[in-house]
Image (cartoon, grey):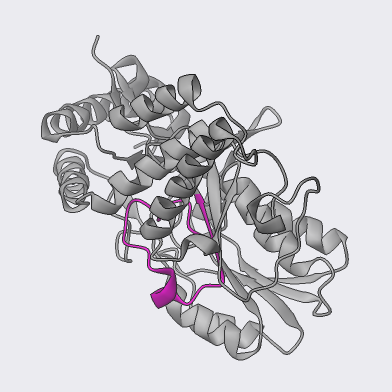
Amino acid sequence: MPRFYFDHNATTPVSTNVLELFSKCLAESYGNASSIHYHGQQSKMLLEQARRHTAALLHASPKEIVFTSGGTEADNLAIFGTMRGNARRHAVTTVIEHPAVLNAFAQLEREGVAVTYLPCDRQGMVSPQAVADAVSANTGLVSVMHANNELGTVQDIAAMAAIAQQTGAVFHSDGVQAAGKISVDTGALGVDLYAISGHKFNAPKGVGALFVRKGVELNAQQFGGMHEQGKRAGTENVPALAAMGQAAENAFCADSSRIGALRDQLEHGIKERIPDLQFNGVNAPRVPNTLNVCFDGIEGEAMVISLDLKGFSVSSGAACSSGAVEPSHVLLAIGLTRQQAKSSIRFSLGLGNDEAQVDQLIEAVAASCAQLRRLSPTYV
């Protein structure tokens, strides 16, 4: 049975030329990038090439790129590196952030920092005015994600960053779901800190980066050697970072309009074939690859399993934690009931998808929905 992947917001397959470079570096470029001999300098050259490519993806200077182990570490470094030891004891974030951000802020609260959590509207959008109302002279950090991982909604980061910086607060954005999908210009956005993760744009897992605007103070959160300008100790994973650099170069040159057209094809096809649906976040600016749909009368996990049996990998709006399936905090935040949140499916497209796959997915979704609704005690 052929299998088709529609869960690219969770992770992406490694591109062919990225995999080739990764394998080549593993075999040949094993020197420590901090060593001054030939093998070390060979690795150093690859590392700095990756830094240039990553910087280009973000329209930044290579000197503003700090390599990390992924988006979670990049977010944590930005949040703790800004607020620990900061005389300002207030921070602002939103209720729809990724757990990498929300759990970091929960830890800050345990350390005595006051945190304001901004709400969103029914489309998953946070108002810049809400940022203006929340910040004060005591605010040290404002953190708002660029694109949401479940809805795909894109926030007005430039407006929020300008508001935050008027009070002297540092502005951080989790860009993990934006980089590689839409154009990201850190200069135009005005962000001070911006986190990305390689495995979201066809690089290996375990590598990411934090953009740190020149002049922004950031305290290291792990200690050892003076790697990454003293901001992130630890010998760099050169093969994986070189691969991320290649993936960044690919993403910088990619045309997202094709994937956007496929997403629209999927949305229209599902709408035409299936009644009693709710499309979440579709009336807001979105990244081109993401569609979130609530199927009345169906458990999302059942739909995921049914589609998996038909050869399609998608994601439900529910996350498994400690053995209990809980509704998505993002979907609850936009006003869905617990049942609606647990009845929602996220489709996220990527480079390997095409029109024929989307057509087959539409047929599979329609068949699964009809079958599950016939069995549902809640669908009338």
The answer to whether residue 378 shows anywhere in this view is: no
Instruction: Tell me where residue 262 sits by quadrant.
Output: top left
Residue at screen point 28% across, 18% down: 3
Reply above or below: 246 against 113: above
Q: Indicate the position of residue 73 as horizontal and vertical percent values.
A: 65, 48
Reply above or below: 65 against 190: above
Left or right of residue 168, residue 198 in this image: left
Residue at screen point 67% across, 38% down: 235
Residue range (magenta)? 173-196
Q: Indicate the position of residue 82 as horizontal and vertical percent values.
A: 72, 68
**In what quadrant of the picture does the C terminus appear?**
top left
Left or right of residue 253, residue 151 in this image: right
Q: Nearer the viewer, residue 92 or 96?
A: 92
Q: Indicate the position of residue 178 as horizontal and vertical percent values.
A: 40, 56
Query: How many dots with numbers?
Result: 0
**In what quadrant of the picture does the N terminus appear?**
top left
